[in-house]
Every structure is written in C-alpha cells, then in structure tokens.
Image: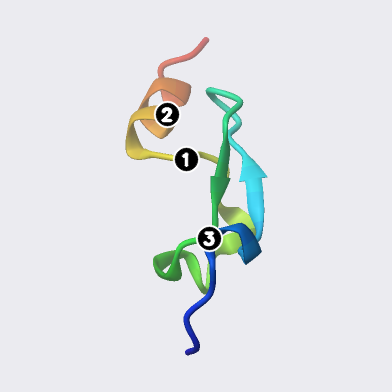
Amino acid sequence: MRMRRKSDLPTKICAQCGRPFAWRRKWLRVWDEVKYCSDRCRRAARGRP
C-alpha cells in the first residue's frame, strides 16, 4: 500500500462527540460500520439513555 497523506483519506463525523476522524488501516474491512472516533466515545454512547 502506497503512503498517503492524512488529508487524502476518507473521513467521518463521530456520532458521539461530533468531531471528524480519518480512516485507519484497522478499519479496512468495517469502515461502513464505524460510527465513533474512539473507544471512549463508543463507551459513552452505550451509556446514553
């Protein structure tokens, strides 16, 4: 895989905090399912009523 600039990667907005986050290689197969920028946001969203 060729090196890319971070600005060239796809981005999404976190469903919890509303901040933009960029694609990561570990999300290669599940990018369509990723909703949160971090484990902290994912845990906070689960605790939400």
Hey, what amino acid is under mark 3?
Lys
Q: Residue at x 47, y 89 (%)?
A: 1
- Identify the colour scheme used: rainbow
Decide which of 14, 3 is in the foreground and name it: 3
Query: On screen, 49 above or below 32?
Result: above
- Decide which of tag 3 and tag 2 comes sooner along the chain: 3
For disc 2, the neighbor class at 10 Å (few under 14, some 14 to 19, many from 20) is some
Q: Quadrant of residue 15?
A: top right
Q: Position of residue 26 (x, y in %)?
A: 39, 67
Q: Give the residue at mark 2.
A: 41
User: Label 1 amino acid?
Assistant: Cys
Q: Mark 2 near mark 1, Cβ–Cβ under 8 Å?
A: yes
Q: Locate residue 45, reporting x and y percent.
A: 47, 24
The residue labelled by disc 3 is 6
Helix, strand, or loop for circle 3? helix
- Judged from the image, the secondary structure of the residue bearing numbered disc 1 is loop
The secondary structure type at the circle numbered 2 is: helix
Instruction: Decide if residue 41 is on the left or right side of residue 12.
Output: left
Crowding at dot 3, Cα within 10 Å, few <14 / some 14-19 / many 20+, comes out as few
- 32, above or below 14, in the image: below
- Closest to the observer, 36 or 7: 7
The residues tagged by marks 3 and 2 sit, at their Cα atoms, a distance apart of 21 Å
